[in-house]
Structure formats: C-alpha cells, structure tokens
Image (tube, rainbow, N blue to C red):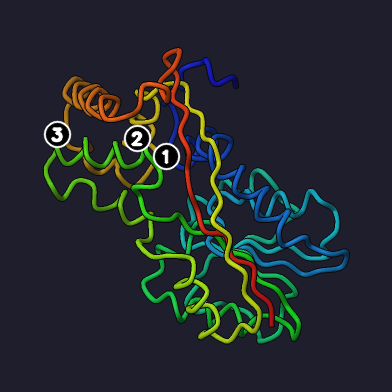
C-alpha cells in the first residue's frame, strides 16, 4: 500500500497493527537490528516480545538460522504471527521468565520491547541465561519522546484534549535515559561487550489524521475512546489530529502527508 492512500481501519487491533504499523515503523527497525546482529548460518535465534513477529519472520527469511523462535505474552498477536509464518516456533510466555533451558540460543533479539518490561534488569539477565557461551543479543528501545516529534506532538494533543493522564501509555513507549545508561544496564546483567548506537529513521504516514487514528484504534490507547459513541470518537480523533499537527514543523506535513524522524537506541551485546 502506498503512503498516499488513507488507511482503512476495518479489522481487529492486532490485524491493524500488523497491516500498518509493521510496514510503516517496526519493519524499518527490524531490518536495522538484523543488519547489526548479522545472524550466522546454523544459529538458533530467539525473538522476545515478538508481537506479530516481524523480527522473527525477517530472520527466518534470511535462510541462515537453523531454529527461529518468537515469544510474546499476547495470544492475539501470536495468532497473527502464526498465520504469517508457520515455519517459526511461536510461544506464549514472559520475558521475565523465559521458558527455555540455559544456553539454548546463539542469538537473542528484542525489538522495541524492553521499555515495557516491569523488571528490565531481570529481562536482561534472562537473555544472558538462555544464551550459549559467546552468544549475542540485539535489542532496541525508543529514546526520549521529545526526540520523535510526531509522538511528542501527539501526547501533548492527547493531554490537551483528554486530560493529563491520557498520554501515559504513549509516553511509556519511550525511555528518558541516554545510551550510556542502557550500556550500563546491559553490562550489569552479565554481558561482556556492549555497543549502543543512537539511530534515527524517517517514518512516513499518509497523514497526521491517519497517524492519530491508528494510535487510537490499533494500540492499547484504543481504550481512551472505547466508551465514546462513533461520532464523538471521530470528533475527538480529528481534534487531536489538528492539535498535534499544529505543533509540528510544517515541513513534516508537506503535501498533506506526515514524515518525521524517530530515534531509538540500538544495543548489540555479547558474552
């Protein structure tokens, strides 16, 4: 689907997530992460907090790994993942208590998931535990929300239109720390070598309205409007979109589209 087309929000949240967010955002970060970790022929690979499975799918498509496993807590996300790539092993489970023996994998990956874990040090220690000696891990996390202009404009618009607590979920996607702190956490968990890069990708949406509609329809933020009548929900989406657009540099809205930089920290670590 081209970026010029408006999105049709006529499916379940996991389906919409996979249909739109994965091509627009997470597939870009998945490709970047795999380029950096560079799986080798014969590797066994675990993708933690896999969602609908883009990182695991891309890994399987490389044709190098002898085993690819995707793990997530959400059964609805895993159902989409299974339908997209039955060759991958899809397992429901927690990043804080990985259901694998010690030394099970050559590579562990976690794209844009660590920031959501209630115990990040434990999650990193679990990565260390399931890696083989000499194993490698790659993970990415969004940096401070102010470094991603569309997201920052969106949360300000949410607070303006729906109250100060409305943006809590969106803000939780981002970590307010620097690359050195992430490196320190990773070393404290037991990794020997750690490299953390600050990476920026250009993200494109058909429009600011589509970006806002996606956020409030196909993510956990859908709960903010779930009790609203259809017309009121649409009025709020348009109001939030207009407010968010007013906060952006006009160059990001050229031609009616939405194009903005998104910043993440990408860490590669090894034992």
Residue 217: give its label. 2
Percent position of residue 145, x then y: 35, 50
Q: Residue at x 62, y 69 (%)?
A: 195
Whichever of labels 1 and 3 marks the residue nearer the N terminus, that label is 1
Say which of 194 and 168 sits in front. Answer: 194
Give the crowd class for mark 3: few <14, some 14-19, many >=20 residues within 10 Å: some
Q: Secondary structure at mark 3?
A: helix
Pointer 2 with pointer 1, Cβ within 8 A? yes
Give the crowd class for mark 1: few <14, some 14-19, many >=20 residues within 10 Å: some
Give the foreground label among 1 and 3: 3
Tell me where residue 246 sits by quadrant. top left
Q: Which residue was labeled with disc 1?
A: 13
Q: Which residue was labeled with disc 3?
A: 161
Residue at the farthest left position = 163
Left or right, residue 148 beside residue 33: left
Q: Is residue 228 above or below residue 6?
A: below
Say which of 183 and 243 sits in front. Answer: 183
């Amino acid at each position: 689907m081209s970026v010029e087309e408006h999105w049709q929000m006529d499916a379940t949240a996991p389906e919409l997530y996979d249909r739109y967010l994965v091509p627009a955002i997470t597939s870009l970060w998945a490709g970047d992460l795999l380029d950096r970790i560079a799986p080798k022929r014969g590797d066994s690979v675990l993708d933690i907090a896999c969602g609908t499975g883009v990182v695991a799918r891309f890994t399987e498509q490389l044709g190098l790994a002898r085993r690819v496993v995707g793990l997530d807590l959400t059964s609805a996300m895993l159902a989409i993942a299974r339908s997209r790539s039955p060759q991958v092993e899809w397992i429901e489970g927690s990043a804080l208590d990985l259901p694998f023996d010690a030394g099970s994998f050559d590579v562990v990956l976690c794209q844009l998931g660590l920031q959501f874990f209630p115990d990040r040090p434990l999650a990193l220690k679990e990565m260390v535990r399931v890696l083989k000696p000499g194993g490698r891990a790659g993970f990415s996390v969004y940096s401070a929300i102010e470094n991603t202009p569309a997201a920052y404009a969106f949360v300000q618009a949410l607070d303006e239109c729906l109250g100060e607590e409305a943006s809590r979920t969106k803000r939780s996607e981002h970590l307010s720390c620097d690359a050195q702190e992430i490196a320190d956490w990773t070393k404290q968990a037991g990794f020997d070598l750690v490299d953390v890069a600050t990476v920026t990708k250009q993200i494109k949406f058909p429009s600011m309205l589509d970006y806002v509609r996606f956020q409030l329809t196909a993510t956990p933020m859908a709960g903010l409007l779930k009790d609203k009548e259809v017309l009121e929900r649409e009025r709020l989406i348009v109001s939030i979109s207009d407010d968010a657009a007013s906060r952006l540099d006009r160059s990001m809205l050229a031609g009616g589209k939405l194009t903005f930089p998104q910043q993440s920290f990408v860490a590669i670590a090894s034992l």
